[in-house]
Image: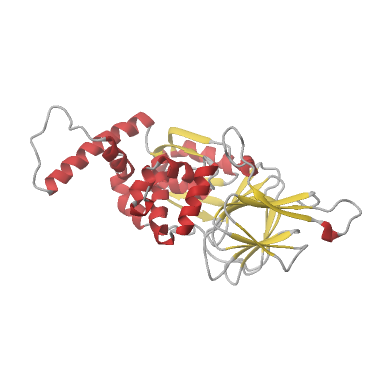
Amino acid sequence: MNFQDYEAIDFACDESFQRYCREEHEADMAFWTEWAGQHPGKTAVLEEARQLVTLLSARQGGRMEQLKHLQDGLTQYERLQQALEGTLPVLQEEPVAVSRHRYLRYAAVIGGAIILAAGGYFFSRQRTAPVSGEVAAATIISAGDEPRKSVILPDGSSLVLRKNSRIELAEGFNRVNRDLTLTGEAFFDVVQDVRRPFMVHTSAFDIKVLGTVFNVSAYTGHPLMEAALFRGKVEITCAQEPARKIVLQPNQKLTVAAPATGKTAAAAVLKVVPLDADPVNHKAREIAWVRNRLEIENEPLSDIAGKLEKWYGIRIAFADDAVKQYRYSGTFESETVLKALDALQLSYPFNFKMVNDTIIISK
């Protein structure tokens, strides 16, 4: 199949590409990651397609209501096209049948009237950091006893800290550097900035990042430390072999096994191995701790906010009461809180920003 001729809509309607976007199947993830790397000219189209898949996964209203909106939208689209061509026919008692291929293509575009309202916003919007500023002095952020704690960094990157884990942001973070030190485990979604690589320091290795999604497990005193890559590329320098640069590809991880008692530090074992996929659901075990599924079915944003607070370990407040009544449906798995809010935004737009440790939602 010649995917080079595909537009964003075609990619978004491809079931394999959808599974890749939702990280549901390792083979699909590996295929599309490799294909994207071989066709850098399609980067913008693939990103647009990924956002379309996200949009289709989180729309306003219940799923039956979404289907009705979709069917109505298809009929309206057909009539609009005919009107533009000057061939608008007399209304028929029965709707004109639409082929399955065209149905799938338009599904990603229309999906109901709400998408038409958000269309210009969606395609022109670039992700911007909901926080601003820089870190004047070293700052420590800890998850404490919370199972998961979401953190939005000043550069717009986000991460989820596991229980009893912490990060320390270097002085001048988001001004002269993007360096942090991790103790414990965290799942990262890093905003790209080629001028200032994102650096994660641990006791066993340092990770250099431009923009990617990865997980790091580096507990002090634990015999095994890991860095697992899901999207993008990272370069790792190990404390045991500082002259060696290890570059991970998606669906790979580096394991660093501590030397046995009584052996020298140089005896630590470094291995690059595939991610450990669950044989039942084919998902990576490395992020099982952050991957639990959150399902929303036609619920008001006020109720959704309460779920997100518990899910991501971050406080959410409202600046406007009206926005609390916006209703959404969707399923979230392995997303950061920013990606979850981004997905909700696309179907019924609202604004949000980070103030201290709280996300403020407004119209």
State the residue in front, 333 or 283: 283
Q: Quadrant of residue 152?
A: bottom right
> Which residue is located at x 35 percent, y 58 percent?
124
Q: Pick whichever, 200 or 171, lies toward us.
A: 200
Instruction: Look at 61% across and 34% down and name the residue there.
Output: 279
Instruction: Count the numbered circles shown.
Output: 0
Depth check: 163 or 102 in front?
102
In depth, the one of 357 and 81 nearer the eye is 81
| 20 sits to left or right of 14 | right
Residue 355 vertical position relative to residue 320 in the rendered view, above or below:
below
Residue 149, image x and y in percent? 62, 47
Q: Is residue 286 above or below residue 270?
A: above
Farthest residue toward the right? 262
Tell me if 53 is positioned left or right of 246 in this view: left
Residue 115: where, in percent of width, then height?
31, 44
Which colour style is shown? secondary structure
Q: Residue furthest top?
A: 93
Q: Position of residue 291 (x, y in %)?
A: 58, 40
Query: Which residue is at a point 54% across and 62% down the rendered structure image?
Result: 155
Residue 318: in sight, yes or no?
A: no
Give coordinates of residue 98: x percent, y percent. Answer: 23, 35
The residue lying furthest to the front in this view is 1
Q: Residue at x 32, y 49 (%)?
A: 118
- For the question of whether residue 191 can be seen, the reply is yes
Vertical relation: 352 (above or below) 15: below
Residue 169 vs residue 301: left or right?
right
